[in-house]
Image: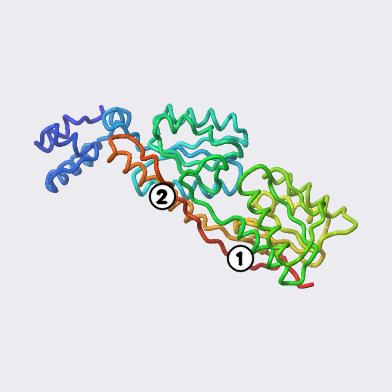
Amino acid sequence: MPSTIKDIKEETGLSLATISKYLNGGNVLPRNKELIEAAIEKLDYQVNEIARGLVTNSTRTVGVSVFDITDVFNGVILHEIGLELSKYGYGMLIVDAGNDPEREAKNIRFLVNKKVDGIISVPVAGPSSVLDPAFVADIPVILMDRQYKDRSLDSVVINNREAAADATRYLIERGHKKIAVICSKGEYTGLERYRGFVDAMEDAGLEVPKEFILAGSHSIEHGYNAMNRILGFKNRPTAVVSTNYGINIGVVMALNEAKVNYPEDISVVGFDNLMLSKVLKTKLTVVEQPMERFGQKGVEILMQRISEKKENNGSLKKEGHINIILSTRMIIGASVKNV
C-alpha cells in the first residue's frame, strides 16, 4: 500500500502543516527539511501531482507544440527543452501539429485544458489566434525558432535573414554569380531566409532569374523536387542555397539519384549542422544554429514568466516582451568550389 503524508508525520514527528508546506514548494527549517526528505526516501513516498496541482494551481508541466514532430530540427529542439525543464523539476507534454493550423489550434486547447504551467511553441505558419485559449487562461507562451507577423510575443530565434545572407555571400566570395535558392514559403523562417538571400545578391549587383527562386513546403519532398527542376535547367546555376534541414536532405537525394557530383558539378550550402551534414562523404557547408541555446533560453524565459505570474497573484504582466536573437556560424565543409 502506498505511503501517505500521515506516514511521513509518524516518521518525523512533524505537523501535517509543515510537511504539506514542504511538499508544495514552501520553505521550512533546514532540520525539518532533512527529516522530511529522509522519510520520503525511506517510505518511498510518491507525490500525488494531481492533488498538489489543485492546491498550488501548478502542474509543473509545460506544453510543447511543434509544427511537425517528424522534422529532425524539432526532434533536437524537443530534446534540449526536455533537458532544461528537468533542471527546474518540470516535465513536458508534447503535441504535434502535423503542419496543420487547425490541428495546432486543437492542440493548444488541449494543453490549456491540461492546466499546463506554460507553453513553448514552434508554430505552424498562420495567425497567432491559435494561441488565444492560452492568452485567455493567462498561460505564458514562448515562441521558438519562429515568430508571428500579427503579434509580438516572447521568443527565441536566430537572425534568419542575416544567416541566409551570410550563406549566400560565402558563395559569392568564391566566384559564384548564378545562384539558386530553395526555400519554404508562407512561414516566418522561410520568408526571412529568402529575404537574406535576396539581400546578398542585390548587394553584389547580381540578378536572380525567377526560375532560380524555388519556394515550397518545409519538406524533404520540396527539396528533392526543386533540385530535380534545377538539374533540368538549360541555364543551370553553379550553386544552390538550401534554407532548412529537410530541404537539405531532399537536395542531396536528388543529386545522388541523378549521379550529379557536388561541388564538381554544382555547389551547395545548407542549414543546420545535424546528422546529414556529418555523415555524407562530401561534407556539406552549412549554417549552424545553436540548438542547445534554443532550449536553454526558451526555458529560462518561461520560468521567469511563471515566477512573475506567481508574484502577480496568478496574472501575467501584459507589457513588454523578451526577444532573444541567437548567433549562428558557418561550418565549412567540402560542398562548395571556387569558380
Residue at numbered disc 1: 330
Does residue 329 appear to the left or right of 141 in the view shown? right
Quarter residue 92 falls in: top left
| Local SS, label 2 | helix
Q: Check residue 153 in the rendering and tell me which mark sits there, or answer none.
A: none
Against 37, residue 57 (above or below) is above
Against 232, residue 7 (above or below) is above
Q: Say if residue 136 shows up in the picture.
A: yes
| Local SS, label 1 | strand
Residue 160: x and y, percent?
Answer: 60, 55
Of all residues, the one furthest to the front in this rendering is 319
Does residue 269 appear to the left or right of 104 in the view shown? right
Q: Nearer the viewer, mark 1 or mark 2?
A: 1
Q: Say if residue 252 shows up in the picture.
A: no
Quick one: label 2, few (<14), some, or many (20+) residues within 10 Å? many
Q: Nearer the viewer, residue 242 or 319?
A: 319
Residue at numbered disc 2: 84
- Specify the amino acid type for callout 2: Glu
* First along the sequence among labels 1 and 2: 2
Does residue 37 appear to the left or right of 218 in the view shown? left
> Do residues under tags 1 and 2 come within 8 Å of each other at their CB atoms?
no
In the image, what residue occupies the spot 82% across and 64% down? 265
Residue 130: x and y, percent?
Answer: 53, 32
Q: Nearer the viewer, residue 273 or 171?
A: 171
Residue 66: x and y, percent?
Answer: 54, 40
Residue 190: x and y, percent?
Answer: 65, 49
In the image, what residue occupies the spot 29% across and 27% down? 54
Q: Quadrant of the C terminus?
A: bottom right
